[in-house]
Amino acid sequence: MSLRLVAPAILAAVVALPLRADPIDPLNELLDRIGLSEIVQIMRAEGLAYGSEMAADLLPGGANAAWDQAVSTIYDTETMSAMVRAGFVESFGAADPAPLLAYFGSPEGESVVAMELAARREMIDDAVESAAREAFQGLDGSADPRLGLLDAFVDANDLLESNVVGALNASYEFYLGLADGGAITMSEDEILAEVWSQEPDTRADSREWLYAYLLMAYAPMSDAALGDYVEISSTPEGRAMNRALFVGFNGMYDQISYALGRAAAKQMIAQEL
């Protein structure tokens, strides 16, 4: 079973943050402008589909009502949104969000967000994801100028490494949840060794998914418009935003993954009795 929880998490106490931004809070306003509420809705849909796949792979009797309810609770969008907001605000640092607010409040920035959300939503469909991956495979290693722009975008924001680290951490948390729930017997060192053994495959898969997604999302953009987006993402403010987004989303996925491990362990034990 693939443990990748992409891309770009819940049994912890929820930080009491508003789902919509206070007008005087520029960081929460920035999250609203980049479509956080829509992103977590898409991630919930991805998570419910992933939960069905996990049940088929892990649970002796497959999914049941208790499992479906557990997965639905874990992927609660209000909780997910609050966790991302908390991590984002805490880690954004001293950078000035004003240039980012201006860009993402402009027609060009709003169009970028709409394209990113549409591509992420469409890639929930396995057939669409496969087609997007095939499109990237056909260009990978070529001198295609669009790939050059995407390379600059990925490198400027350390997107590949951040995705790989996030996926490995999520995998670790899932195994830890299984172990803490009594479904498997593994020490933390054994879990670390197992997760680290996945690194090459995780890196290759993350790279392919990332570029497939970016190619699909930005296909309607001109090279000039994409260049503008790469430029703003490469500024200190853009880098601060992307770092903070990874802190928020990876922290969310860590907690989701642990919760899924605990829920899966509970079902595995119950179905074996």
Image (cartoon, rainbow, N blue to C red):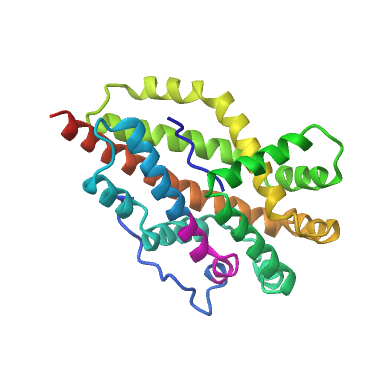
Q: Position of residue 125 (x, y in %)?
A: 53, 48
Is 143 magenta? The answer is: no
**Residue drawn where x is 72% and y is 48% of the image:** 215
Q: Position of residue 100 (x, y in %)?
A: 68, 66
Query: Looking at the picture, does residue 236 appear above or below residue 134?
Result: below
Q: Position of residue 39 (x, y in %)?
A: 52, 59
Which secondary structure dominates the residues rendered in magenta? helix
For residue 158, say whether it is visible.
no
| Image position of 93 (left or right of 220) | left
- Give 98 or 214, whichever is nearer the viewer: 214
**Residue drawn where x is 22% and y is 37% of the image:** 267
**Residue drawn where x is 28% and y is 41% of the image:** 63
Is 31 magenta? The answer is: yes
Q: Quadrant of the C terminus?
A: top left
Q: Residue furthest bottom?
A: 23
- Give 49 or 223, whichever is nearer the viewer: 49
**Residue drawn where x is 40% and y is 60% of the image:** 77
Magenta residues? 29-42
Q: Position of residue 212 (x, y in %)?
A: 67, 43
Q: Quadrant of residue 268?
A: top left
Q: Quadrant of residue 230?
A: bottom right
